[in-house]
């Protein structure tokens, strides 16, 4: 059984003035147990909508989303128990401390403070997060530190499926490296299946078992990174991941990560 | 530690406590703002009570039982402060999380929406009682109130029953920001203002135009005020307050399930249209 399976998922949004935006167009993909699948795509390609649909925040117009064989649209609560998410924005109560946010997040998944505290300490030690800073308001922490706390919060509920929606976007190089290292550790130490949406080519290539390219709501390709690159080989030369992305989407790395329509 | 090993009811109870504790943490962190609002509420209640003190001096109010009028006004101010607090906390459930940026995280968590709203309701009631007690304490020091006949027990029962229907009312209002992220919260402020206007907070409902009196019949605040005033000013017992209690019970039975159903519809709509997003 696949950890995550999408079949023919479609989603359109009506904008003002009656314009219809097709955010997801017949998306079919699967993530195996313990597998890390990366989705590369420029802003507005539909990555965030894809994550929102899987995390039950958006209901698809058509198609099926299953998490370990459970229909996410029909049984959202059963699916939510086994899933967690880290998004590009630090979704925290800014005035509350990291510890307060983590304890609150744990309780929403039925984990008491007494159960969560030792686990939080263990996770914070693991990621090199100074414990005394855990009592500071989130707004005093750097973006990189906030993103580490977001990953810790997700891990705290022992999810079998993790959805990482651009977890390193906007981070400084050092923080980016730390967060990527943390994701690598999660991958090695836990049995979680991970869907990682990003526009960082290196990140996708390095952390993922398979990489897909998404554009205008469609998955153009989804393969192991070497195979993906070979697919776009010209004159016998295997391109880099950046070149592969450009060949598939027509976007450069800079254009892909430029501020765009975040709605999709 | 994994939550799947726990019975469902226990997971929900832990989550209710999670919401209550989170709101307590937020109150602590926004302490200065809380102090500002507490001061504002206290000063507001005192100012309104002083209107009663000044009636005779203004002219035309000769023969007025000033002490009774002041008590009438203060009870109105206190009960409105308490009930509007419950309404505000509930009706801001969605908007607050949208502003903080946590709405998606909260709405994708596995605990039920009833648990979410119950946690908000429990905190609103406890916080409302604490805040109103402080205002009442200050008012007792500042004014020589006529509460010699007061039946506090009956007044508390009235307020407890009214709190339930106000929670339901607040949940209905909370759906507005789900339907319209930009304008929804403003609508809840209008609802709150209308409750203040028609419920007889600072005057008997009978002075209102007929059409407003009709609306007042559907406001739980009307019955809470009538009952509380009768209990506190005239010492009326529970058995004689049935005319205030039964409408509140009916409203509680109607508004709470209706609120949850309307919220469910609103949440479904927001999930279909992609409106369940942060804006902060």
Image (cartoon, coloured by chain):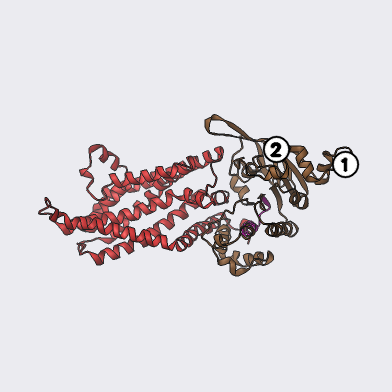
Q: Which residue is mark 1?
A: A237
Q: Is residue B193 left or right of residue A220?
A: left
Dot 1: chain letter: A
Q: Is residue A161 visible?
A: yes
Give the letter of the brown chain. Answer: A
Name the outermost residue toward the left.
Answer: B63
Left or right, A77 with respect to A128, comes to left
User: Farthest residue toward the top?
Assistant: A18
Mark 1 against mark 2, which lies toward the viewer? 1
Q: Answer whether residue B237 is visible to the viewer in this image.
A: no
Q: Earlier in the sequence, mark 1 or mark 2?
A: 2
For disc 2, the marked residue is: A215
At label 2, counting other C-alpha atoms closer than 10 Å, the crowd grade (few under 14, some 14-19, many 20 or more) is many
Between A53 and A251, the residue placed more toward the observer is A251
Q: Residue at x 33, y 55 (%)?
A: B81
**Are marks 1 and 2 in one subunit?**
yes
What residue is at 48 percent from the left and 48 percent from the top?
B94
Chain letter corresponding to the colour red: B
Task: Give the magenta range.
Answer: A149-163
Q: Is residue A162 magenta?
A: yes
Give the Cα distance between marks 1 and 2.
24 Å
């Amino acid at each position: 059984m696949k950890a995550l399976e999408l079949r023919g998922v479609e989603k359109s949004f009506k904008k003002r003035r009656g314009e219809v935006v097709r955010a997801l167009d017949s998306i079919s993909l699967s993530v195996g147990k313990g597998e890390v699948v990366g989705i590369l795509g420029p802003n507005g390609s539909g990555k965030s909508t894809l994550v929102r649909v899987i995390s039950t925040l958006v209901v698809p117009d058509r198609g099926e989303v299953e998490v370990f064989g459970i229909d996410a649209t029909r049984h959202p609560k059963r699916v939510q128990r086994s899933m967690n998410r880290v998004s590009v924005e630090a979704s925290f109560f800014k005035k509350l401390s990291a510890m307060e946010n983590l304890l609150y997040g744990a309780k929403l998944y039925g984990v008491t403070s007494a159960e969560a505290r030792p686990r939080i300490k263990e996770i914070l030690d693991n990621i090199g997060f100074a414990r005394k800073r855990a009592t500071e308001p989130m707004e005093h922490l750097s973006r990189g530190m906030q993103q580490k706390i977001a990953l810790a919060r997700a891990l705290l509920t022992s999810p079998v499926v993790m959805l990482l929606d651009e977890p390193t976007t906007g981070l400084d190089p050092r923080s980016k490296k730390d967060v990527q290292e943390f994701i690598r550790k999660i991958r090695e130490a836990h049995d979680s299946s991970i869907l990682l949406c990003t526009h960082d080519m290196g990140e996708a290539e390095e952390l993922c078992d398979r990489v897909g390219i998404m554009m205008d709501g469609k998955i153009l390709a989804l393969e192991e990174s070497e195979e993906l690159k070979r697919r776009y080989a010209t004159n016998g030369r295997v391109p880099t991941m950046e070149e592969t992305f450009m060949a598939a989407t027509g976007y450069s790395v800079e254009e892909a990560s430029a501020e765009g329509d975040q709605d999709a | 530690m994994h939550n799947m090993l726990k019975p469902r009811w226990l997971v929900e109870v832990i989550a209710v406590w999670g919401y209550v504790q989170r709101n307590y943490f937020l109150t602590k962190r926004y302490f200065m703002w809380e102090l500002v609002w507490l001061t504002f509420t206290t000063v507001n209640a005192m100012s309104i009570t002083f209107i009663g003190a000044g009636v005779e001096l203004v002219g035309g109010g000769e023969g007025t039982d000033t002490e009774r009028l002041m008590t009438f006004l203060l009870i109105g101010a206190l009960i409105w402060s308490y009930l509007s607090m419950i309404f505000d906390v509930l009706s801001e459930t969605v908007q607050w999380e949208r502003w903080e940026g946590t709405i998606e995280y909260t709405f994708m968590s596995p605990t039920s929406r009833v648990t979410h709203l119950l946690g908000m309701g429990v905190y609103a009631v406890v916080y409302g009682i604490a805040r109103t007690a402080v205002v009442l304490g200050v008012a007792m020091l500042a004014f020589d109130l006529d509460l010699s006949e007061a039946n506090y027990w009956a007044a508390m029962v009235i307020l407890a029953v009214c709190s339930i229907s106000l929670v339901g009312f607040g949940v209905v209002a909370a759906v507005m920001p789900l339907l319209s992220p930009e304008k929804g919260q403003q609508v809840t402020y209008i609802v709150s203002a209308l409750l203040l206007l028609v419920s007889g907070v600072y005057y008997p409902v009978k002075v209102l135009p007929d059409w407003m009196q009709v609306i007042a019949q559907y406001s739980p605040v009307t019955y809470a005020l009538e009952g509380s005033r009768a209990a506190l000013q005239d010492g009326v017992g529970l058995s004689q307050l049935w005319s205030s209690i039964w409408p509140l019970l009916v409203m509680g039975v109607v508004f709470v399930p209706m609120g949850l159903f309307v919220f469910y519809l609103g949440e479904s709509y927001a999930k279909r249209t992609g409106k369940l997003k942060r804006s902060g």
